[in-house]
Amino acid sequence: MRLAERLTNRRGTVSSWTAVVVLAIAVPLIVDQLSDYDVTLCITAAITAIVLQSVGIVTDRAGMLAVAPLSFAGVGAWIVGVCNVHGWPGGFYLWLLIGGLAAMPIGLLVGLPALRLRGINLAVITLSFAVALDSLLTQWQFPGTLSDQFVQRPNSLTNDTSFFLLCWIIFLVFALVIWGLGRRPAGAAWRSVARSERATAAMGISVPRTKLFAFVLSAFIAGISGGLVVGQVSTAVAANFDPVASLSIFAVAVLVGAGNMEGALLGGIFGAFMPEVLQSIGINQNLGNILFAIGAIQVLSVGTSMTGGWRRSLRRLARRRAQPIDAATAVAEAAEVAASAGAVAPLAPPAPAAPAAAAAAVRNGAPAGSARNGTGAPALSIAGLTVRYGSVVALESVDLEIPDGKVHGLIGPNGAGKSTLVDAVTGFVSRYEGSIAVAGVALEGLAVHRRVQAGVRRTFQQERTVPELTVGEYVRLAAHRKISRQEIAEVIGLIGAPAPEALIAEVDVGARRLVEIAGCVASRPRVVLFDEPTAGLAQAESLHVARSIASLPERFGFSVLLIEHDMEVVLAACEHITVLDFGHTIAEGAPAEVLAMGSVVSAYLGEQAVAV
């Protein structure tokens, strides 16, 4: 029930913010009452939590296995030491910022292999960097160590309690920044990259830029933490940033879910206090690292971190409490939905652009806009398309043209070349013969995200939504433009997707496909390629989606290429269809006429079955 989901979401948001405010005020008050030694441990916990935030961005949010967080922290610590030795103006606060900024280009450099490598290969590369930097730090020593030029805190930070307050404020600021980015496309794209790089590129988002942004921001945060280490102990040594410690931090980050604020905080507490707890009960401290590693392996096998599991459980509990709704509330909900549906006006497509201007805009990175191009050119024009994989010819001299504002079907048996055609149009197959144009704009030489900007969108046979996002957040990300809540509600209502507040991880696979379709529609492309959009849906849902697709050209002004195996969906949605078989076009025309052709029937059933 949509109203129940809204109420659950609002209550959850209010509760979360209340908890954060209480935590922000209560923690400094509690720390102020502790002994000097305990305050020192709290400082360590806060600095460790900041390091974990940097790991959480790259690993927990963007899904990249990078195990060199303390190397970036070492860069920040080194810069603070250099500033102190040379007496640079600005004092500790400015030096701290400079240390974070200095770590950013190192983060960019370390992030470059992530453009090609994934998983364990990336982990090995980043660990190699950590080992190399550790060797340099061991050989050179930190600035001021040999000459006893130690960093002095400002007068406002002379006692440990005030220094803890600085660390706590920095942690909260970074938590707020990460939370804010997570609700914006720039941060939501991290989650999308972790889920599917192909799907991210198909939204028009630059995957390399998204990855490098994650590494650069992570390095900045880690660099700040390194400067805080110097502020805590007045200097630093290579052992503070050795590769083994980086591996331990990585294991803790994976275990607790450092992409969440509470996960980073919990990991910081574990990292600072666990050795003391183990020592107090007479257990070797190395056992703590082993336990963290075992926990991280368990988390990787289960697929969710500690705090990720907690959040999921809390959402389920909140949803259960919101379920009992009386009849009066149900009537009010129905009235609300009806009123909101009536208040939503159709989306008006933007003014048309000439092909030359559109092409220039795309190559300069500007969005192409919507479909009604007004140029007289077809929405999608394919001429002589041939795709070869070595000696295998997947498509041979395929011609296809979709008029402006039409729904065109593409059918054929498995292996006919339908998905290959979609990959070629959207840029996932870059080597092909022939030409592809959208509204008169040639797509040759354009990367995937540039083709999206030219006005091409697609879905995939396997749904590739982002489970960590809500439906509304995903649609906003997939739209790849500024979009109002009203537009999101209209698109979701048209397609029949779950409410904007629903978490995608908590809806079934069929509903996720509807969310993916809604994201494509919200982007207002010139042409959208739906690759089996009703797979996994019940028959009634499939026909509803077919009718919705049939209404898209009139309602939103773009054209559709529909790839489907369900002939009822094809008949309900398409005005014209093309049939492929073994990479060749064997028929095209009105759906009813084409489906009755003997060549089409034999392509699906085989000539022997037809003869019988």
Image (cartoon, rainbow, N blue to C red):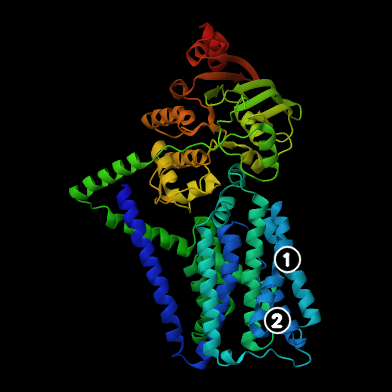
Q: Earlier in the sequence, mark 1 or mark 2?
A: 2
Going by the picture, which residue comes out furthest to the front? Answer: 351
List x then y, in percent, for residue 561: 55, 28
To which quarter of the image does residue 102 belong?
A: bottom right
Q: Quadrant of residue 433?
A: top right
User: Does residue 2 appear in the picture of this structure?
Assistant: yes
Question: Does residue 315 appear to the left or right of 295 in the view shown?
Answer: left
Q: Residue at x 66, y 37 (%)?
A: 358
Q: Secondary structure at mark 1?
A: helix
Q: Secondary structure at mark 2?
A: helix
The mark found on residue 105 in the picture is: 1
Question: Which residue is label 2 attached to?
Answer: 80
Q: CA distance from mark 1 to mark 2?
A: 16 Å
Spot the residue most to the right.
Answer: 139
Q: Amino acid at mark 1?
A: Pro
Q: Is residue 259 visible?
A: no
Residue at horizontal 41%, vertical 63%?
A: 310
Number of residues whose C-alpha sits closer than 10 Å to that of mark 2, classed few (under 14), some (14–19) or many (20 or more): many
In the picture shown, does residue 238 fall above or below 552?
below
Amino acid identity at mark 2: Val
**Residue displayed at 58% across by 34% down:** 352
Q: In the depicted view, which residue is nearer to us: 124 or 190? A: 190
The answer to which of 295 and 44 lies nearer the viewer is 44
The vertical placement of 414 against 519, above or below, is above
Instruction: Name the residue nearer the viewer: 152 or 603.
Output: 152
Q: Is residue 491 left or right of residue 327?
A: right
Q: Residue at x 49, y 22 (%)?
A: 574
